[in-house]
Amino acid sequence: MFNTWPFDTLLPAIDRINTAQQFSIDEHSDLLSFCHSVSAIKPVGEAKTETVAKLPMQAVAILVQDSKFCFSGESPNYTRKELAKIIEMYGGVAAASVTAQLHYLVICDVPNPAWAFQMYGRKVEKAMNMKKKGAGPEVVFEQDLITALKAFGYSLL
């Protein structure tokens, strides 16, 4: 399980806590939030939910112009084609797969039942493995992308 999400994220955090024999309020909050996000994922066959399973990542500044984006999951607001058009409208490029040239993998907010283990999919797994090796795209969420676009005057259609 060491190389399987969520254990590959959770176990190092537990090791740090165990070694230090204490943890801050922020660490406690982050760990609790992560555990809640994992437990909020619904099994295949259950109704889709607006609950977002968040990866425990720091906020990333999203630069749209001249950047390549790929999308994973199902957006509650847009089709992938619509997201690609929005990205292109602001000077970015939409890509179909995760490669070393990709800048951002955008996780859309509604979990897709086809995702491996009803969690994240192969695109996210590939991106996270690339990041562990020191390269690869930033993994961001659709809402973070929309927030970044709002700085350029974008509003929901």
Image (cartoon, grey):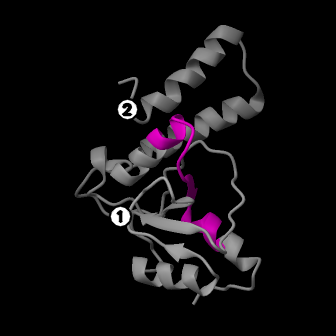
Q: Quadrant of the C terminus?
A: bottom right
Residue at x 65%, y 9% (from the top left corner):
19
Residue at x 35%, y 24% (from the top left corner):
1
Task: Give the crowd class for mark 1: few <14, some 14-19, many >=20 residues within 10 Å.
Answer: some
Is 53 a magenta residue? no
Query: What are the residue bounds of the magenta stretch?
Result: 129-146
Q: According to the image, label 2 marks what residue?
A: 4
Q: According to the image, label 1 marks what residue?
A: 48
Instruction: Let me know if residue 96 appears in the view.
Output: yes
Q: On the picture, is 35 further left or further right than 21? A: left
| Residue furthest out toward the front | 101
Residue at x 57%, y 59% (from the top left corner):
103
Q: On the picture, is 128 further left or further right than 92? A: left
Amino acid marked by disc 2:
Thr
Q: On the picture, is 46 further left or further right than 86? A: left
**Place of residue 10 in the rendered image (x, y in percent of width and height, measured from the top left):** 51, 28
Amino acid marked by disc 1:
Lys
Q: Indicate which disc, 1 or 2, sits on the residue closer to the N terminus.
A: 2
Q: Nearer the viewer, mark 1 or mark 2?
A: 2
In the image, is residue 11 above or below residue 145?
above
Q: Quadrant of residue 134?
A: top right
Q: Who is closer to the viewer here, 65 or 36?
A: 65
